[in-house]
Image (spheres, rainbow, N blue to C red):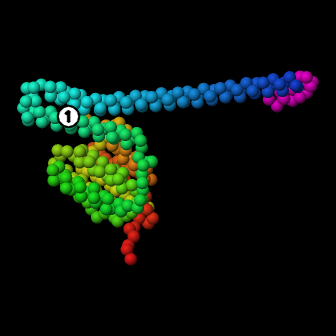
Amino acid sequence: MLSFLLQASAQGPDQRFTFFVSTAVVASVVVFAAGVIVTLLRRSDRRRAEEEKLAALGTATARILHQIKNPLQTIVLHADILQDERIVSEAGQRREVCDAIVGESQRLVAMLEELSVYASGSRAKLTRTPVRLDQLVQQVAATEIRESAGTGVKVSVPALAEVVVLADTYYLRQVFENLVRNAREAMQGQADARLELRLERSGAAAEVRISDNGPGISQEKLETVFQPFVSSKAKGMGLGLAIVREIVEGHGGTIEAQSRPGEGTSFVVQLPLHGEGTPAVAA
């Protein structure tokens, strides 16, 4: 290359001019071609991303329609039964049919509300104030203990660390109630079902651990539990844990699922402490 340039410099002015013009043209063509290639690659990436979004949207739409279709079919079926005079003339059967219609209607409303919450996002709605996290966890546990008489689940609450976090009480309560409900449903019909709620300090964070001794979750499913529209429940929309994660992250926290098949499951929520995390002592 050096010898080529030296040879070019030894030529006449016209030849040198032609050489430099040719070099500039070649360089411009190379730069232009590189720009075209980069543009095409970016366009291809955008098209691929758009295709992936459309595929995800199609999957989500199919799951939503499937979940909504089931209660609607039940409502239509039982409404049609009500037109049969032989059935409606019997009070007990008429009551069962009406109860089914009301129950499925309520289920449909709950699904739509869940979709609305997920679609609108909860982060923008959070109104955070200093909250005694131990008192909130205790309230959730107390409600579960009262209901455990009918479920057979043994609820235990070891000593709760007294900590303060900056939180929206309404949404944070939803997090713990959802996790407790999932644990209870996972152990449904299980003998010696146990549920534990624990609150401890972990460095500059408060750590809430909700554990059960249910069937557990496989590693493959564990990696997708927080993804929207993924559910192992026959009647589940698959948004509960996705909303839970969004609320926790909206509080600047993290949530993790730990489980092994046959050994139960734990959901661990970590939230940053407010101030030093210690409740103020009245003078």
Specify the quadrant that holds the N terminus. Answer: top right
- Looking at the rendered image, the quarter that the C terminus falls into is bottom left
Residue sticking out furthest to the bottom: 283
Report the amino acid beneath label 1.
Ile
**Which residue was labeled with disc 1?**
101
Residue at the image position 30 percent from the left and 46 percent from the top:
260
Q: Is residue 166 above or below residue 246?
A: below
Q: Nearer the viewer, residue 40 or 237?
A: 237
Residue 160 lies, in percent from the top left, at 31, 63
Question: Residue 237's quadrant in the figure?
Answer: top left
- Side of 142 where 35 appears, left or right: right
Residue occupying image coordinates x 18% and y 29%: 78
Q: Nearer the viewer, residue 38 or 57?
A: 57
Instruction: Name, please, the residue furthest toward the right.
Output: 12
Q: Which residues are magenta?
A: 1-15
Residue 271 makes an appearance in the image: no
Q: Can the viewer see residue 20?
A: yes
| Front one among 216 and 132 | 132
